[in-house]
Image (spheres, helix red, strand yellow):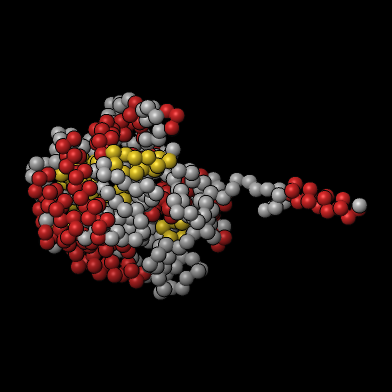
């Protein structure tokens, strides 16, 4: 089945549904294509960046070794404004474009021109803002602290940077608990109001808009979603949906079926591949996966395949044959200090890291805190996830939704439900990446040095001992 989206998508993007397995909100095969970019076969994932780059991987190595065709970037990574220079223009807006990098976003981040760029206001997951959002602005966390980003400023930034896809502002609650009904209603009303201003400001832009769908019940945001379907889908201004909760899709099938042919990007931060499989079955096409960077930082090498092999006998001595196998291998474990095995089992990964290096080498790099260790893990882990999605697409193409469901059940039986903790010491993080807003959160970075003699101040202790000695001799 081929769907021509010329009437309902931005002219710069074409979405083709290659195969539908069930009508409505269900798994499907598709292809997203942007002019001048590599096509994206779906279901698939997009790279997740920090300051415009995949952590630990330079853009040239990303182009050579990572199999990602799109990257998510956050505007808050680029708009630092020191207080003493309030009128200073952020450098990204002053970047010159080139023939190779025709947009400022590609040029400033040195992103390969074949990679599709997706711009949002905040990282995933976002750092909770103590001040919250206002009627016409959201709080973003820059390198100089929290500041407000107005709807007008964000629209201007998108127009200046020209990403391939932009996600309009959404009034999201960053708390771990679900918002109450009053807060949820305000979220829907603000997002609806901001969407009106967004489409008015970017009318005629080449940037494709993926409208946010909030993580609240459909009954609360129905008016906003109806506006998307009735006002902006027919005019071609709406190119896709960015969902913060995949469970809203069945409601769209029932109440806004005209939106279902659009591509669906999940900003749901799924913690494991088990959650990814469930959301694919609901009809998600693209995923942003922050856990990829987190497990690489933890010294973990992904070790799963899809479909799961018939025999899942462990390659380590920590599990017994027949029991669920770990989703990842902790390469900081002393058991790998002399192991000449590749990062993953020989038949499951053909990435550069597995073909050129072994576990003992990466184990040494992690303990020596050499950045190359995390670079190799990123290359390997991205390759495993890319192969995972390729396996999902092959299963859907050959056997359909029933085959995917059966393979997902076998995968759940074959692998643990969660990733291992990872004993490796994490790389040092920038101070603005993580910050406690409620108190009590431990520091992410260990002190680079401590006081002589341990926790006690050696000089103060010596002076105290001297005073006691003088008192006793009087």
**Residue 358, percent from left and from top:** 50, 53
> In the image, is residue 79 above or below residue 186?
above
**For this rendering, which residue is in front, 14 or 134?**
134
**For this rendering, which residue is in front, 324 or 25?**
25
On screen, residue 472 versus residue 108, left or right, reads right
The answer to whether residue 162 of the structure is visible from this angle is: no
At 32% from the left and 39% from the top, the residue drawn is 149
**Residue 318, percent from left and from top:** 50, 69
At 76% from the left and 51% from the top, the residue drawn is 461
Quadrant for residue 141, please give it: top left
**For this rendering, which residue is in front, 295 or 31?**
295
At 44% from the left and 51% from the top, the residue drawn is 437
At 22% from the left and 55% from the top, the residue drawn is 185
On screen, residue 213 versus residue 345, left or right, reads left
On screen, residue 450 versus residue 464, left or right, reads left
**For this rendering, which residue is in front, 280 or 206?**
206
The answer to whether residue 307 of the structure is visible from this angle is: yes
Residue extending furthest toward the right: 474
On screen, residue 262 versus residue 158, left or right, reads left
**Residue 394, percent from left and from top:** 24, 58
Q: How many marks?
A: 0
> In the image, is residue 203 above or below residue 343?
above
**Residue 166, percent from left and from top:** 24, 41
């Amino acid at each position: 089945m081929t769907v021509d989206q010329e009437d309902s998508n931005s002219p710069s993007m074409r979405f083709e549904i290659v195969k539908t397995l069930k009508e409505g909100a269900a798994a499907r095969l598709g292809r997203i294509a942007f002019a001048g970019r590599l096509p994206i076969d779906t279901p698939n994932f997009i790279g997740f960046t920090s300051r415009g780059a995949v952590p630990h991987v330079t853009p040239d190595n990303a182009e050579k070794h990572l199999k990602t065709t799109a990257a998510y970037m956050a505007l808050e990574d680029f708009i630092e404004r020191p207080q003493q220079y309030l009128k200073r223009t952020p450098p990204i807006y002053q970047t010159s474009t080139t023939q190779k990098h025709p947009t400022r976003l590609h040029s400033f981040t040195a992103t390969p021109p074949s990679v599709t760029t997706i711009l949002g206001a905040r990282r995933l997951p976002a750092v909770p803002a103590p001040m919250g959002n206002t009627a016409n602005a959201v709080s973003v966390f820059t390198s100089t602290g929290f500041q407000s980003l107005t709807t007008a400023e964000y629209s201007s930034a998108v127009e200046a940077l020209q990403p391939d896809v932009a996600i309009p502002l959404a009034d999201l609650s960053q708390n771990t608990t679900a918002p109450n009904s009053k807060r949820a209603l305000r979220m829907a009303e603000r997002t609806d109001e901001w969407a009106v201003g967004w489409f008015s400001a970017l009318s005629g832009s080449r940037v494709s808009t993926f409208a946010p769908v909030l993580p609240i019940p459909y009954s609360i945001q129905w008016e906003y979603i109806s506006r998307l379907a009735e006002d902006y889908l027919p005019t071609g201004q709406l190119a896709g949906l960015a969902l913060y909760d995949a469970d809203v899709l069945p409601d769209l099938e029932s109440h806004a079926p005209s939106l279902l042919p659009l591509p669906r990007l999940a900003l749901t931060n799924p913690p494991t591949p088990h959650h990814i499989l469930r959301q694919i079955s609901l009809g998600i096409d693209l995923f942003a996966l922050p856990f990829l960077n987190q497990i690489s930082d933890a010294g973990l090498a992904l070790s799963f395949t899809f479909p799961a092999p018939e025999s899942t006998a462990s390659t380590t001595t920590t599990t017994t044959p027949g029991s669920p196998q770990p989703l990842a291998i902790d390469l900081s474990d002393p058991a790998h200090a002399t192991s000449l095995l590749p990062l993953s089992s020989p038949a499951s990964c053909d990435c550069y890291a597995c073909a050129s290096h072994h576990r003992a080498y990466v184990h040494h790099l992690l303990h020596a805190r050499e950045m190359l260790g995390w670079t190799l893990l990123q290359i390997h882990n991205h390759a495993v996830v890319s192969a995972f999605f390729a396996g999902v697409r092959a299963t859907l193409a050959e056997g359909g939704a029933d085959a995917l469901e059966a393979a997902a059940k076998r995968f759940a039986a074959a692998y643990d439900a969660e990733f291992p903790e990872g004993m490796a010491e994490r790389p040092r993080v920038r101070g603005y990446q993580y910050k406690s807003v409620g108190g009590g959160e431990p520091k992410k970075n260990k002190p680079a040095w401590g006081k002589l003699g341990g926790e006690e101040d050696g000089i103060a202790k010596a002076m105290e001992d001297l005073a006691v000695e003088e008192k006793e001799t009087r």
